[in-house]
Image (cartoon, rainbow, N blue to C red):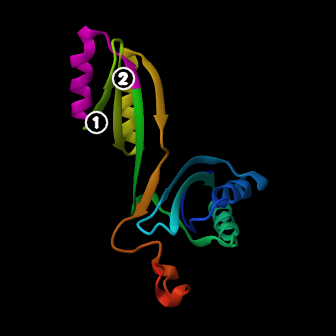
Amino acid sequence: MDKCAISILVENNSGVLSRISGLFSRRGYNIHSLSVGVTEDSKFSRLTIITFGDAQIIEQICSQVKKLAEAVNVEPLPFDQSVFRELILVKVRAEPGRRQEIAGLTEIFRANIIDISEISITVELTGNPNKIKAFLSLMEPFGIIETARTGLTGILRGSSSIKDDVKNKRSGGNLNG
């Protein structure tokens, strides 16, 4: 089974996330990662779902999601033709004598220290999964207290948009009105 990213543009209605996740659940598909947020137009939200499956399964998932009333567009995001990022918050143990070392590693990874307590430092890092994995491995020796991750979000490279395929289907070619 291959790892696959699927981008879904939906009308920003209550319950749409529940319907999409229910579709995955009813068919026995696992969601490895899910990222959701409103787009530049507040009428629409974009979901990036990371799942596993062969080409036939991914095609079936996309086909089923397209049937939902709120689904505006669904497209696989090929890993070699897309840009992906994830946000992670990492809280690590940080005795006063080791804070400079943590700060140095944070700077190398272009991360930000967003909180400091007497015994811990919380770092915010955005990047691809390999960058996050590398950062976490370097933080391990300090003692990771906890992490919070957003999951991958992605977008196709270049000037095309997920809205390109649907511009003529809705509102006379205008998704914004």
In the image, the segment drawn in magenta is: 91-109
Q: Is residue 114 left or right of residue 149?
A: left
Q: Residue 130 carries which label?
A: none
**Residue drawn at (61%, 64%), measured in percent from left and top?**
13
Tag 2's secondary structure? helix
Tag 1's secondary structure? loop
Q: Is residue 108 magenta?
A: yes
**Residue drawn at (48%, 60%), measured in percent from left and top?**
38
Residue type at numbered disc 1: Ala
Q: Which of 40 and 4 is in front in this view?
A: 40
Residue 118 image point, x, y percent = 33, 12
Q: Mark 2 points at which residue?
A: 139
Q: Residue 111 carries which label?
A: 1
Q: Nearer the viewer, residue 16 or 5?
A: 16
Q: Does the magenta stretch include residue 105?
A: yes
Q: How many other residues sit within 10 Å of disc 2, few (<14), some (14-19) or many (≥20)?
A: some
Residue with the most extreme bottom position? 172
**Closer to the eye: label 1 or 2:** 1
- By secondary structure, the bulk of the magenta-drawn segment is best described as helix
Q: Is residue 44 left or right of residue 21?
A: left
Q: How many other residues sit within 10 Å of disc 1, few (<14), some (14-19) or many (≥20)?
A: some
Q: Earlier in the sequence, mark 1 or mark 2?
A: 1
The quadrant in which residue 16 appears is bottom right
Report, in whole angstroms, how far the alpha carbon at label 1 lies from the one at label 2.
Answer: 13 Å
